[in-house]
Image: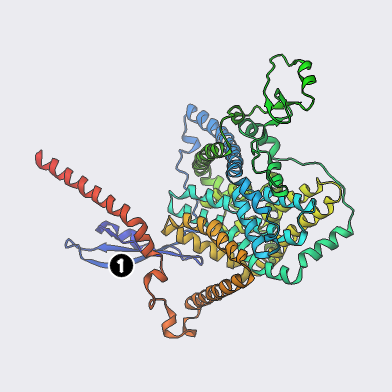
Amino acid sequence: MHSECFVMGQGSDKKSEKEPPAYNAAIVKNDVLIADDDEDKTKIVEEEEFDPWNVHELKDDAVPWSELTGCGKVERLVLWFLKPVLLLGLLYMFICSLDFLSSAFRLLGGKAAGELFAQNELLRNPVCGLMIGVLATVLVQSSSTSTSIVVSMVGAGMLEVEQSIYIVMGANIGTSVTNTIVSLAHSGDKNEFRRAFAGATIHDMFNWLCVFILLPLEAASHYLFRLSTVVVNSFQFTEVGEIKLLKVITEPFTKLIVEIDKGVITDIALTEGATEQSLLKRYCKTGHLVLVNSTEEQLTFFSNGTYNWTITENVPTSEWKHQCQYLFAQVNLWNDTIVGVILLVAALLILCICLACIVKLLHSILKGALARVIKRAVHAELPTKVGKYLTGYLIIILGAGMTFLVQSSSIFTSALTPLIGIGVVKLEQAYPLTLGANIGTTTTAILAALASSGDGLVRSLQLALCHFFFNVSGIILWYPIPPLRNVPIGLAKKLGNTTAKYRWFAIVYIILMFFLLPVAIFGLSVAGWETLVGVGVPLLVFALAVVVINTLQTKRPNWLPKKLRTWDFLPLALHSIEPYDRLLTGCCKKKGAEKAANYETIKLLKKEEK
C-alpha cells in the first residue's frame, strides 16, 4: 500500500506515542511526519498500523436513557420502532430494484442471449459453451433465467446434457456481476469500498477457480454427467408446480411497473425468426379485453366488460385476450430498447438511494450494546475444536437456506455486500455464506426442472443435478483445507486493496472480467481448438509463472535469483498500476489544482483590497 504523509504540529506527539494493535491480516501503513521545531524540520517518521478488514464497534454517543426527559424517551422509543420498519421497507425496495435491473438487462440483451444459445454447433466446444453461459447471464442479469433457458432446450431435445454442463458453469460466473455492481455504491468511503468490493469479488474468485479445475476434469472424465445419471436412474421423480417464496411479496409491486415474457428468449433460442417478438408481456390473465386477429391486432376496450359477439363471427381466427395493465404496457410506441434504458436508469437510481439509506440506517442502529450482541451472533462459533471446525459448514447451510427463501443468489449476495462493507460481517464469514448461496441457487433450478413434464423431466433434472454437484465439488476443493480456503479470500482482499487505492479499477475489473475476457476467449474458441490452444496455453503458462514468482517474492525471496526478487528491472507500466492511474486521473487532478490555486489567489486579492 502506498504511504500518505501528513505534516502535523507539535501537539500531536501524545497521539503518536500510542501504538495501535498489530493484526495478522492485511495491514495498511501510513507514514506520519511530525515537525518538532519552528523551522518545520521533519525529524520523526512513524508508521501507524491499522487493519481495514477488522472494523471496531461504533461508539454509542447517544444520551443515556436515565438522563433523557419524558419527551426524549418517547422520541427514542418511536425511533427504535421506526428504524427497523424503515430498514425492512428499504430492503424491500432494494430487492425490487434488483428485479427491475434484471428486467432492464433482459430487455436490452435478452434477444442477444437467446441468439447465443441458438448456436448449437458452437456449444459443442466446452470453452465456447462456458463463455456463452457467462455472456448470456451477464446480459440477462440472472443465472436462474439463463439456466432455465438451457433447461428448456435440454427438455426439448435441442441440447444434450453433456453440452449444457459447461453453459451452467458459465452461468455460475456471470451471476456474480450483480453484487459487484452493488459494491460500487460504497465508493464514497475508502475502507467501506475495500471491504464491499472484496466481499463481492470473493464470489467471482471462487467461481473462476472452480472452473479452472473442474472444466478440464469434466471434459476428460464426464464425472458430473455420470454421477447425475446414477442419481436420476436411482429415483422416481414426479412433476411439481412452480414454487414461489419471496416473489409472492415482491411480484405485486414489480408487476405494476413491468412484466417480461421470459418465454420469448426461449423461443429465440429454440426457433428461427422469433427475434421480432417483443420481450414485454402484452397479454395477461386479467385486464381490458382485446380482440386479437391472426394477422393484425385490433384493440377494443369495454368499460362494462361486455362486447359484441357479431364481430367474432366475421373474423373466425380472432381471439379475445386480456391486455396487461402494468405501467409500460400503456406506452405502445416505445420499443424494448427504450423501455430497457429507462428501466435501467430508474433501477440504478433506486438501488443506489436504497443502498445509501440502508448503510446510514445500519450505522445508526449498530452502535453500543446492540452492535456487540449482533456481532457475537454473526461471529458465534460452536464450543470445542470440532464445533469450531463445523461452524463454517453450518454457515454454508444457512447461506443455502437464505438463498432458497429469496430464490436468487444475486439477491442474497447483493444484500450481503453492504453488511460486509460496514463491517457487520467479516470476509471470512461472508465466504461460506457465498458458498451456501451457490448451493441454494441450484435448488431453484432443481424445482424448475421438476416443473417440467413428459420426457423432458429426466433430462432437465439431470442438468439441474449437474449444477448442484458442480458447486458441491467446488466447496470440497476450496473450503475444507485452510491453505486452499485462503486462496479466494486472499485474491478478494488483493482486489479490495487495489480498488481502495485506485477507485477506477472497479469499473475496469467489471468490464474486463465480465465482457472483454469472455468475448476474447469466445472469439478464440470460434476460431478453432488450434487457435485457442496456440494462444491460450502460452498465456496461461505465463500467468501461472507470474503468480508463482509473486508468491515466492513475498514468502521465500531467497529462493529466487537476485534479479527476480523484485520487478524493478521491468518498466513501471508492466508491474504497477500507478502510471495508468496518473494517466486516468492526472487531468482531473490538474484541473482541481488549478481551481484551488485560482481560489486562493482570489482570496488574497480580496484581503489586500480590504
Q: Is residue 273 left or right of residue 190?
A: right
Above or below, 367 against 198 in this view is above
Element class at badge 1: strand
- Image coordinates of residue 263 in percent, x first then y, are 71, 42
In which quadrant of the rendered image does the C terminus lie?
top left
- Residue 417 visible to an observer of this rendering: yes
- Image coordinates of residue 48 in percent, x first then y, are 38, 63
In which quadrant of the rendered image does the N terminus lie?
bottom left
Q: How many marks?
A: 1
Which residue occupies 65% across, 44% down?
A: 275
Q: Which residue is mark 1?
A: 45
Q: Is residue 220 left or right of residue 517?
A: right
- Image coordinates of residue 371 in percent, x first then y, are 55, 47
Q: Is residue 339 left or right of residue 114?
A: left
* Three-letter residue code for mark 1: Val
Which residue occupies 57% across, 50% down?
A: 178
Above or below, 147 against 320 in this view is below
Q: 453 and 383: which one is in front? A: 453
- Residue 409 visible to an observer of this rendering: no
**Colouring chosen for the image of the structure:** rainbow
Quadrant of the rendered structure where residue 204 is?
bottom right
Neighbour tally class for label 1: few under 14, some 14-19, many 20 plus, Cα within 10 Å: some
- Image coordinates of residue 482 in percent, x first then y, are 63, 69
Q: Is residue 560 left or right of residue 373?
A: left
Q: 156 and 249: which one is in front? A: 156
